[in-house]
Image (spheres, rainbow, N blue to C red):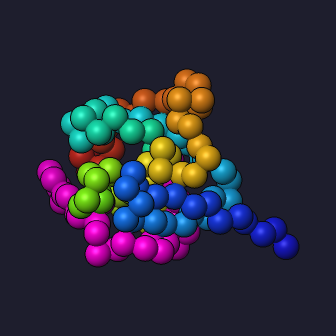
Amino acid sequence: MKINPIHKASCHCGAVKFELILPNGLDDPRRCNCSMCRKRGTIVASAMLDNLKITQGEDMLTLYQFNTMTAKHYFCSKCGIYTHHQRRSNPKQYGFNIACLEGVNPYELGEVTVYDGINHPADNN
């Protein structure tokens, strides 16, 4: 039986803390060129909804939605750091800010794929 380690993560001020189970590690680290991601500038990876658990500060999270109002973007209301979002292209997953993970330096990831969020696949339905 494979046991997946729990990865700890938090916003900048520490008001929001969460844990992730990442069976495949940092699966598909990426940036996106949609208006939100361009301005946010983070590198994200994905986790299944059941694999992300807020352990502290859920009441400190602020929800932001735009355009189709499908994706749910969460930020710490105290320090403003984006922590995670429920994905529009796959609502069964959260995208999460890799920089929030303890012990991970996103600048050491090397080349990161940029997704074409301007032409989002959900817009073609």
| Residue 113 pos. (x, y %) | 49, 30
Magenta stretch in the rendered image: 45-74
Residue 82 lies left or right of residue 101; in this view the side is left
Front position in the image: 54 or 112? 54
Quarter of the figure that contains the N terminus: bottom right
Does residue 94 appear anywhere in the picture? Answer: no
Q: Residue at x 34, y 34 (%)?
A: 41
Where on the picture, by quarter, is residue 60? bottom left
Q: Residue at x 39, y 51 (%)?
A: 12
Q: Residue at x 26, y 52 (%)?
A: 80
Residue 91 lies left or right of residue 6; in this view the side is left
> Residue at the left extreme?
67
> Is residue 47 shown in magenta?
yes
Where on the picture, by quarter, is residue 58? bottom left
| Residue 86 pos. (x, y %) | 36, 61
> Residue at the right extreme?
1
| Residue 21 pos. (x, y %) | 62, 64
Does residue 35 appear anywhere in the picture? Answer: yes
Q: Residue at x 45, y 39 (%)?
A: 43
Residue 107 to residue 67: above or below? above
Task: Report how many numbered discs are placed on residues in the image.
Answer: 0
| Residue 79 pos. (x, y %) | 28, 53
Residue 100 to residue 17: above or below? above
Residue 100 lies left or right of residue 120; in this view the side is right
Residue 88 to residue 4: above or below? above
Residue 71 lies left or right of residue 29; in this view the side is left
